[in-house]
Image (spheres, helix red, strand yellow):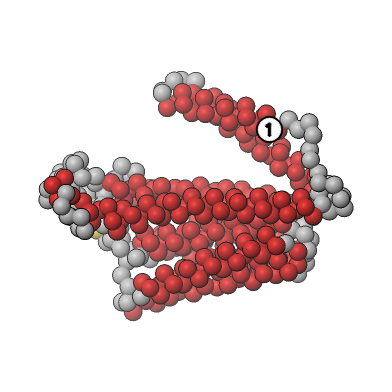
Amino acid sequence: MDFVVIAIIIVIFFSLGSAVIGMLRGGREGSDKMFKALRVRVSLSVFLFLLLMFASFMGWIEPNNILPTQ
Amino acid sequence: MSNEKYYVPHGTYWPIIGSIGISTLFVGFANHMHQVGWGWPVMLLGFSIVAFMLFGWIGTVVNESISGTYNKQVDRSFRWGMSWFIFSEVMFFAAFFGALLYARTLSVPWLAGADNNVFTPELWEGFKATWPLISTPGEVGQNGTMFSTNFKLVDAWGLPALNTALLLSSGVTITYAHHALRSGHRNALVAWMIATIALGVLFLGFQITEYGHAYHDGLKLTSGIYGSTFYLLTGFHGFHVTVGVIMLTVILYRIQKGHFNADNHFAFEGVAWYWHFVDVVWLGLFIFVYWL
C-alpha cells in the first residue's frame, strides 16, 4: 500500500513540474499545458486522500502514533 | 507588451527603502533576542517598513505592467524569475523532508545499533529506536526516564484530516477559478477566489487549534528530533499558507480592478501554482508525518 501512495505522490510532483514548464513557456499553448497539468494534480490529490480513507477503513493501512503521553 | 525596448526602471527608491527596512528589522530582532527593551518596537518598525516597501514596489510593477511598459522579453523574465523562486521553494521543503527521512530511517536506528553497530550502542546504553522520538538521548524525558517511549494513538482522521480536506478543497476551488478566468467568466472567478481564500483562512485557524492541542499534550519544539522536525515542517508550511492567502487576496483585488484577461494573467498563474505547491506540501506532510 505504501508503494501505491508514494507512486501517486511522485506523479503529483511530475504534474506540478509539468505545470511550471507550461508557465515558463507562456502564451495560449503554455497556459493550456499549465492548466491541464494542475487539473491532473488536483484530481490525483483528491483521489489519494479518498484512497487513504478507503484503505484505512479496509485496514490496509494504519496511521502513525503521534502524540506522547504524559 | 507594446514596447520593443526592454524596460529598465531608473531612479527607483524602493531598493534603499527595502534595505533600511530589513536592517531595522534585524537590529530590532537581534536586540529583542538579547532582551533589550527597545528591540521589539524597532523590530515592528522594520517589519512595517518592509511591508510598505513590498506594497509600494509591487504596486509600481503592477502599474508598469498595466500601462503597457513591458514587452515579451520582460514577460519571459518574470516567468523565469517565478521558476527560480519555485526551485528555491522546492529545495527548501526538500531539505526539511530530507531531515525527517534521515532522522527517522537512518540516524535514530543507528543510535540503537543498526547498520554500523560497532560504535553507536556504546553512546547511549539501553536506547531503543522508536518513532516518534520525542526526547533527545542523554536528556531525562518527560516520563522521568532517559528515553521517552510512551505514546498514545491520535486519530489521524481528526484535525489533520479535516485540514487536508480543507486545503485539497481549496486546490479544487482555485482550479475552478483558473478555468473561469481562462473562459472569461468574471463572476464565477471572483466567487471561486473568495472560496479559496476562505478555505485557506479556515485551514490556518484549525492549524493553530491543532498546535494548541499538541503543545498541551506535551509535544514541543524541544521534544526530541520528532518535535523539532514536526514544528519546523508544519510551521514553515503554515507560514507559506499565510503568504499564499495574502497573495490570493492581492490577486482578488487585481481581478476586481480588471487587471487580467483570458490570455494575459501571468500573476494569477504564478500565485495559483504557488497555492497548488503549498497544497501538495501539506499532502506530503499529512502522509509522511501521520501515515507512512
Q: Please give the name of the residue rendered at 76% of the width and 33% of the height, measured from the top-left corner.
A: B12
B77 or A44, nearer to the observer: B77
Farthest bottom residue? A58
* Residue B14 occupies quadrant: top right
Res. A56 in view: no
- Identify the residue shown where x is 46% and y is 72%: A8
* Residue located farthest toward the top when viewing the structure as drawn: B37
Query: Label 1 is found on which chain of the structure?
Result: B
Q: Position of residue A39 (x, y in %)?
A: 60, 71
Decide: is B28 above or below B95. above
- Residue B288 vs residue B278: left or right? left
Query: Which residue has dot 1 on it?
Result: B15
Q: Secondary structure at mark 1?
A: helix
Residue B280 in the image, given as x and y percentages of width and height: 50, 62
Q: Amino acid at mark 1?
A: Pro
Task: Work out whether B20 lies above or below B109.
Answer: above
Judge by depth and name the residue closer to the eye, A31 or B230.
A31
Residue B40 falls left or right of residue B179: left
Location of the C terminus of chain B by quadrant is bottom left
For label 1, the crowd category at 10 Å Cα-Cα, with few meaning under 14, some 14 to 19 and many 20 or more, is few
In this rendering, does residue B105 appear at all? yes
Left or right of A33 on screen, residue B224? left
Q: Residue shown at 32%/73% (left/top)?
A: A61
Residue B110 image offset from top left, x and y in percent:
22, 54
Q: How many marks?
A: 1
Percent of width and height locating residue B76: 73, 54
- Classify residue B201 as left or right of residue A36: left
